[in-house]
Amino acid sequence: MDIFDPLSEQSIKQFLESKKSQIYSKTILKAIDFLKTKQYLVQKLINCGEFGLVFQVLDTSNNNVVAIKQLITQDKASLNEVQKEFNNFKQFNHQNVNKCHTQIYDDVNESLFLVSEFCTFGDLSTYLQQQELTKGEIIKIMKNLIQGMIEIHSKNLIHSDIKPQNILIGNNLNLQICGFGLSKLLSLDKSQTLDNGLTYFYSPLEQDEGNIKLESDIYSLGSILLQLCRVDFCNYQSILNLKNGNFEHIKSPEFEDLLQIAFKMMHKDPEQRLKLIDSIDQLDSISIILQNNIQNIDGQYQGELQNNIRHGLGTQIYNQSHELNISYYGSWRNDQKEGLGCQSFKNGNSYVGWWKSNQMHGKGILSYSNGNRYEGEFINDKREGYGILYYSNGNRYEGNFKNGFADGKGTLICANGELHKGQYKYSKRNGQGILLYSNGSRYEGEFKDDKINGIGILYYNDGAKYEGEFQNGFAHGQGTLLMANKDKYVGEFINNKREGMGILYYFDGNRYEGDFKDDKKDGKGILYYSSGAKYEGEFKNGFAHGKGTFLKSNKDKYIGEFIKNKKEGMGILYYYDGNRYEGDFKNNKRDGKGILNYSDGAKYEGEFKNGVAHGKGTFFHTNKDRYVGEFIKDKKEGMGILYYFDGKKYEGDFKNNKKDGKGILNYSDGAKYEGEFKNGVAHGKGTFFHTNKDRYVGEFIKNKKEGIGIFYDFDGNRYEGDFKDNKRDGKGIIYYSNGAKYEGEFKNGLVHGKGTLFMANKDKYVGEFINGKKEGMGIFYYFDGNEYKGEFKDNQRDGKGILYYSNGAKYEGEFKNGFAHGKGIFLMINKDKYVGEFVNSKREGQGIIYYNNGSRFEGEFKNDEKIKGQIINNDGSIKLFCSY
């Protein structure tokens, strides 16, 4: 519904049918919409013709009521004529000439709108139908019309369409000339035209000749005067008599003096017609004769009398002591105010309008001393019928009145932009109605005692909607609230707030069932989440607050305290996987002191922060290990002690749930590591004390001796060098407790590779080692000066080699188990040379001795002695030899 559309399409159709108009209702609706864009709000339809309409309109720029005439035509010549005439008459600012304000053209619908002053009491034609006039009243009307016409003629303009329908009664009861030929174009009224096209109120001769002039308007005013004197001349024969200047048939003894003035104004010869200024003088002369003065207990009266009682046009001045009235000016009948009149009251109010039997009766305007103003219908001194009440604060009521009060259907338009349309009783909203708020919200439903009361619907400007019970202007009782975010509440309301039992359906699928207070979840309730989770318990200020149970969608369950929708305070959290936490919560997380029991039997007891073990605590492992110390974010971190079920104990730094930093690991067998840890293992520099009292000082990698280190044997040996995989590996030096020293390569904990062994007896071996033994090529320097170069095996000379003796002898050949064994050559000090077989460092087997004198022995040796053979002398002689 549009708040500025007081006319329904059905009522417009009925109006057009009553006027037998061919104009479509949609044309009027378009006009109403167009005028609204120009700040003009149509209040009612006044009249319509073949090509146009007349509206009563509110100008919202100044809150004044105006009349707007709409011309609907595609005839450009007609439009131009109207616009020209209208612009001509915009220049007038005279009390007896209707004020023209502005003109507006609608290009889309090809309509011209003319805005002019609005007159509440209608036109002279309607007025004449309501009561017969006295001579004084006729004189007043004619003087108003003549003064208005003098103003028009002063601008050298011709009205050319004077008739009762173009004479309006202003709000001050002055008559105003309007029309300016426009009614002809609009075809608003054809009742004043004869079949031959002649108009009652214009000179027939001048109409025939088409010669309209200033004097034509004077003729028209004379015709008006005849009608005011109740002379019927609106027939063809009368028009012909008037055309010939024959007035003999017109008789009225009561108004004979006025008729003579009319005849002069309607003279056949325009030049002989009575001048306007002269007509006023003659009317004044008659008026003086009518003036009568009477004194009575109510004050002084001046005006027309009949049979010595007030009758006609007059003014009553009341004594100041009178309880109600001060003065009245207007029509009287039979000593009572009757007809149009103005009344001022002692209380400061004033009234202009119709009277009957001394009471306001008919259309009128009542202006109150407090600034309020009523324009509408009266019956027996009370507002009754249709009317508009303008309040001094800018509010405005339009609608029905009864017994002085707004009663029935009406519309209240407030200065703050609010609008109510509906039923009224005793000036209060009662019954069905629609209230449109300035912010765009809208209420449709029942009212009682001027407040929203009963069943109704409130549409909010943000798209929300409340449907249900209201009380004293508030949502109160059972109702449904559909919120702008598509949430929906069904339940109880108190004073516009959700209060009592209710169900809140969230757009995301969540649902709350329970208590509400002060528009929020408060009390006991259940909140069902779309995810399958559920909270059941206490609420406060819209939040889960107090004691409650929360079932998560993953089947975890919390039982305990809540603060502002969050787990806070003491509680128990049962995890679906079997874990269970008992203790403090803060900000929806485990925080404070608590115990976390794991489904596998493990347990943490201590401090929590932000949902995780954090601070000091104790963790009991399922394997019965136990950690006592610091935690950060659910992990052992900081200083702590780890007691192993097998008897070990670690004291020191932890990081990321593992031994990390500096610490001491005591083994159950008495061993101990003291040093650096990383990722749970000995890593870095440290000292390992073995149970056999061996001691390692050096580098560790992943719980193993690796890198550079020193190993102290309990028996006094000392190794300095590389370690790998917990063993000596790489290069190093072994210092033996007996004074021996090995310097060289190691592998898998053993001397392996190339190295030098300094023995306690001062022997020295330089060469290859395998698995802790001299093996491979090497040189053995004996403290006595001997020297062996050759192969070693299993820590002994084995293979091929050369043994240099300190006395100059030399053996070169095969060795086995440390002895010359196999084939070899022995060079003796005396330069004798043995070439042959050896067993355990002795000549044994076949061999040859080359003597330095050139002879030689060839034969068999045993235990380093010749056994059997031959001696070949240097002269070639041969001698057999046998030792047995």
Image (tube, helix red, strand yellow):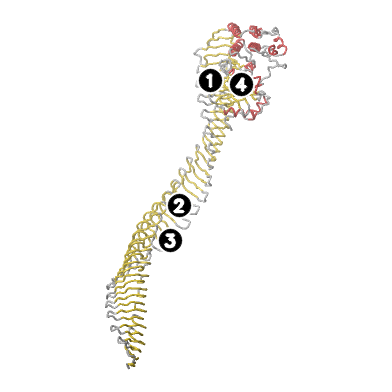
3 or 4: mark nearer the eye: 4
* Number of residues whose C-alpha sits closer than 10 Å to that of mark 4, classed few (under 14), some (14–19) or many (20 or more): some
743 relative to 397, above or below: below
Q: Could you tell me which secondary element the residue under label 2 belongs to?
A: strand
Q: Which badge, 1 or 3, comes first in the chain's sequence?
A: 1
Between marks 1 and 2, how big is the CA–CA gap?
Answer: 72 Å
Residue type (three-letter) at the residue carrying disc 3: Gly
- In the displayed structure, 440 sits above or below 338; it is below
Answer whether labels 1 and 2 touch (C-beta < 8 Å).
no
Residue that badge 4 annotates: 83
**What residue is pinned by disc 1?**
367
Whole-number angstrom distance, CA of label 4 to CA of label 1: 35 Å
Tell me the distance, in whole angstroms, between the alpha carbons under discs 2 and 3.
22 Å
Q: Quadrant of residue 763?
A: bottom left
Q: Which residue is mark 3?
A: 601
Q: Which mark is residue 559?
A: 2
Disc 4 marks a residue whose amino acid type is: Gln
